[in-house]
Image (cartoon, grey):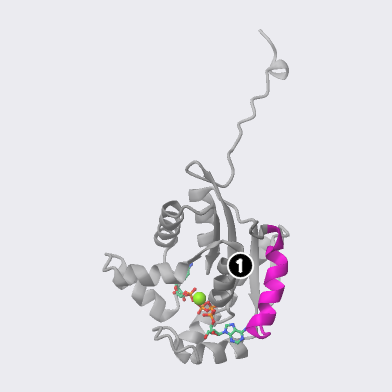
């Protein structure tokens, strides 16, 4: 009988970032409320062929659909609180599976450590990088109060709660990825077109081939 030392080493290959039989590229787009995540994601979709999945938009669509979780989600959003991870991850995973694309911008997720760890555990997907829109609260507040999209959370009381959640729960997620050298920070206080110039430089490797 051979010794343990002689035993062949079996390396189990873990297929990374697979979604069914599709290999996917995921970029997490983070930043405070009103930092311009949705605005810049629309530009990235147009120029670089990614699909934009906003966690907040998916949750709002779930409320509209009359789902059994609708009332709970609506109450959490009104309070600026983070919806349980399993709900949001299921929406994101379903949206990625339904879509034929293999490049996704996941906007507004992960919002806390629980979101981050649960997404990794459930999907086994790690982001290629994290795009972080950095902006002052004063500027974000001004933008949110002028947004006029009828969002139930664009009022000063909820905006303050969202800022607190961002600092206490979301910044640690950005720190987590920063420690892994995965964060690409953008000065989001500049005008929209200037912010996009900086974004474009980051996405250059993903340029569509004509
Ligand atoms: N660089 C910018 N300069 C000025 N206004 C901006 C800029 N970027 C976005 N805006 C405006 O600010 C508002 C908020 O932008 P957007 O919805 O993209 O932010 P967000 O980060 O997705 O916010 P939320 O987290 O609340 O969804 C919008 O009215 C948008 O037109
Ligand atoms: N991962 C997430 C993302 C969002 N929410 C809830 O939705 C609200 C709006 O999100 P936006 O990204 O559109 O600003 C947010 O304040 C949360 O209540 C969430 O729970 N989890
Ligand atoms: Mg948004």
Determine the residue positioned at 68% across, 71% down.
Answer: 199
Q: Is residue 4 left or right of residue 89?
A: right
Looking at the image, residue 164 lies above or below residue 176: below
Magenta span: helix, strand or loop, mainly?
Answer: helix
Image quadrant containing the N terminus: top right
Q: Residue furthest top?
A: 1
Q: Residue 46: percent from the left, percent from the top?
A: 57, 68
Percent across and percent down for residue 74 are 35, 75
Q: Quadrant of residue 39?
A: bottom right
**Residue 64, x across and y down, in percent:** 30, 72
Report the residue that reaches farthest toward the front. Answer: 210
157 and 88: which is toward the camera: 88
Could you tell me which residue is drawn at 39 percent across and 61 percent down? 87
Residue named by callout 1: 47
Q: Nearer the viewer, residue 203 or 173?
A: 203
Query: Can residue 196 be found in the magenta stretch?
Result: yes
Task: Please provide the residue range marked out in magenta.
Answer: 188-205
Mark yes or no: residue 90 visible: yes
The answer to whether residue 110 of the structure is visible from this angle is: no
Within 10 Å of disc 1 (Cα), the crowding (few <14, some 14-19, many 20+) is: some
Residue 8: % across, % down:
68, 19
Please state the total of marks drawn on the protein image. Answer: 1
Is 61 situated above or below 26?
below
Q: Quadrant of the C terminus?
A: bottom right
On whether residue 64 falls in the magenta region, the answer is no
Q: Nearer the viewer, residue 121 or 209?
A: 209
Q: Secondary structure at mark 1?
A: helix
Q: Nearer the viewer, residue 2 or 195?
A: 195
Question: Label 1 CB, ligand 1: below 8 Å?
Answer: no
């Amino acid at each position: 009988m051979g010794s343990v030392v002689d035993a062949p080493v079996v390396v189990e290959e873990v297929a990374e970032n697979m979604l069914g039989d599709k290999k996917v590229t995921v970029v997490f787009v983070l930043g405070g409320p009103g930092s311009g995540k949705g605005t810049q994601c629309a530009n990235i979709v147009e120029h670089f062929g990614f699909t934009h999945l906003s966690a907040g938009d998916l949750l709002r669509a779930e409320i509209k659909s009359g789902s059994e979780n609708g009332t709970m989600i609506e109450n959490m959003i009104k309070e600026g609180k983070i919806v349980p991870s399993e709900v949001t991850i299921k929406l994101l995973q379903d949206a990625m599976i339904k879509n034929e694309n293999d490049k996704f911008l996941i906007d507004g997720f992960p919002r806390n450590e629980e979101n981050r760890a649960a997404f990794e555990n459930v999907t086994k997907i790690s982001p290629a990088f994290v795009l972080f829109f950095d902006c002052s609260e004063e500027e974000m507040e001004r933008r949110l109060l002028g947004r006029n999209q009828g969002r139930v959370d664009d009022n000063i009381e909820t905006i303050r709660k969202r800022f607190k959640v961002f600092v206490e729960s979301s910044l640690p997620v950005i720190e987590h990825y920063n420690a892994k050298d995965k964060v690409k920070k953008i000065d989001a206080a500049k005008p929209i077109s200037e912010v996009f110039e900086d974004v474009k430089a980051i996405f250059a490797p993903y340029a569509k081939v004509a």
